[in-house]
Amino acid sequence: MGKQLGFHIDSRYCSGCKTCQVACKDRADLKVGQLWRRVYMYEDGGWFKVGAAWRSSVASYWVGISCNHCENPKCVDICPTGAMQKREEDGVVMVNTDLCVGCRSCAMACPYDAPQYNPDTGKMGKCDACSDRRAEGKRPVCVDACPFQLITFGPMDELEKTKGGTPWVKGMADPRLTRPSLLINPATGAARSPQEGKGNQ
Amino acid sequence: MKDWSLIIFTIVMQGAVGIFIASWLLGMLRPDQQGRTRYLPWIGALGLVGVIASLTHLGSPELAYLTMRNVGRSWLSREILGVTLFGGAWLISAVLEYRNLGTPRVRDAWHAVTAICGLGLIFVMSMAYRFFVVPSWNTAATTAGFYATAGLIGTTAVLCGELFATRKQNDAKPAPQDLTWLAIAAMGFVGLQVLTIVTRGVYLGGAGPEAQATAAMLAGSWFPLLVIRLICLGIGGAVLMAWTMRQWAVGQKVARLVPVTVAAFVLVAAGELMDRVLFFASRVQIGQ
């Protein structure tokens, strides 16, 4: 297989403006209820007692994700027609709509809500990392749209070297389950310990 | 509730397998020709309902013929293959019985093949739901529960059918003693179902936050349905079956047993339907 491509998100500076989400929705002409890139707000922390006083550790942060083009994609395993495929040359997970029967099993198997059902076509749709744009030498539309330029798309090994990051972010599935091609520089308090997960692979 | 097609598909296919196996075993114990063909049309009708229900779940049903392309990796593909194999084997069983082809021994041997296809279908059907993203499904209790559903529906339905047939001949006749094993088997499947409920409950408590969220749903908004389901299972599969056996022992007339076994079957089938509704309604996916 060629170099695995994936996304890097610098979540530390994400303001939750959702421009990436809207740009993706606009490019793919998605109807109400479908979002191939989603920006989630997570809330964390609480109040705890220190002596006679109460202190707060309340925090919130934004995390934007699309399909993570996992190394071990469960959507590909479960698809009965073979419509969901992982591309050899770049590791991008694609859905072949000519084969898709619209059974939604991929949506049930994905821990990131990536494959989404389109009731108009009776087929599944998902982020293909803007394969058509990339074929023209352009970047994925979410990468171009981010006003803070916090999203990067490229070979995972290079992203890891140049940007760092971790797939262990609070609120997201244990990355050992599907090995997502995703790295995030987490907002303060959003990093998660690998020891927390049970890793039921 | 958007899962009705899958609820109906799984219940009726498991029921069809259960009825086939119970009636085949009965056919081996009491070789009467009518008894051998009595349930075959019902099994076919249930299978047809299941296939139609499964097609309504698809966004593009015209491409359903493609669903066996990924048998090497996908349990869902294997499930479709299982339905096809069981359906094909049932068809051959029906042709053998209706045309009276071969000796009863040869036909029974083929029915054994059909029964194995049915048992295999229930296994792959359960595996299609056992994936890690839904922790409440990813347990052996799912497989055991599906087998118990098949056993409960199969034994109670065949018991009803046999008593109906006996009453048709002579309603003053004592209930045939050679059917008591069906009531005993039904009570055994109640035991298996109770065991799966207990083991699932224990598992949900320790299998991570999503499983615990499922447990909270079952103990919260879905609790009334869970209680009704348990009452149906207990009364239909255990109390009424035990009562029937007692009446059998004192040589009760078949006419008196028919309404009780029909009530038992209806309660058991309704209970299994509720169980499947709970199965789908209380799922919580990892990461969502």
Image (cartoon, rainbow, N blue to C red):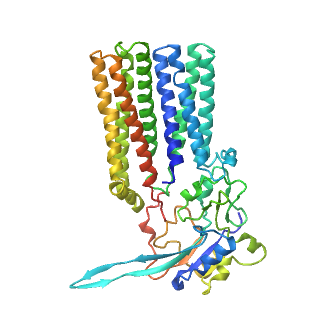
- Identify the residue shown where x is 49% and y is 56%: B132
Q: Quadrant of residue B108?
A: top right
Q: Quadrant of the N terminus of chain A?
A: bottom right
Q: Quadrant of residue B103?
A: top right
**Vertically, is B238 above or below B222?**
above
**Vertically, is B79 above or below A35?**
above
**Vertically, is A192 above or below A95?**
below
Name the residue at the left extreme.
A52
- Identify the residue shown where x is 31% and y is 30%: B240
**Can residue B138 be seen here?**
no
**Vertically, is B221 above or below A11?**
above
Expressed as whole percent of the image width and height from the top left, the position of residue B230 reads: 33, 43
From the viewer's perspective, tell me whether residue B164 is left or right of residue A15.
Answer: left
Expressed as whole percent of the image width and height from the top left, the position of residue A90 reads: 70, 67
Name the residue at the right extreme.
A136
From the viewer's perspective, tell me whether residue A122 is left or right of residue B230.
Answer: right
From the viewer's perspective, tell me whether residue B246 is left or right of residue A25.
Answer: left
Q: Quadrant of residue B162?
A: top left
Count of numbered tags: 0
**Can residue B180 be seen here?**
yes
- Identify the residue shown where x is 58% and y is 47%: B75
Between residues B180 and A84, which one lies in front from this camera angle? B180
Between residues B176 and B141, which one lies in front from this camera angle? B176
- Identify the residue shown where x is 45% and y is 59%: B284
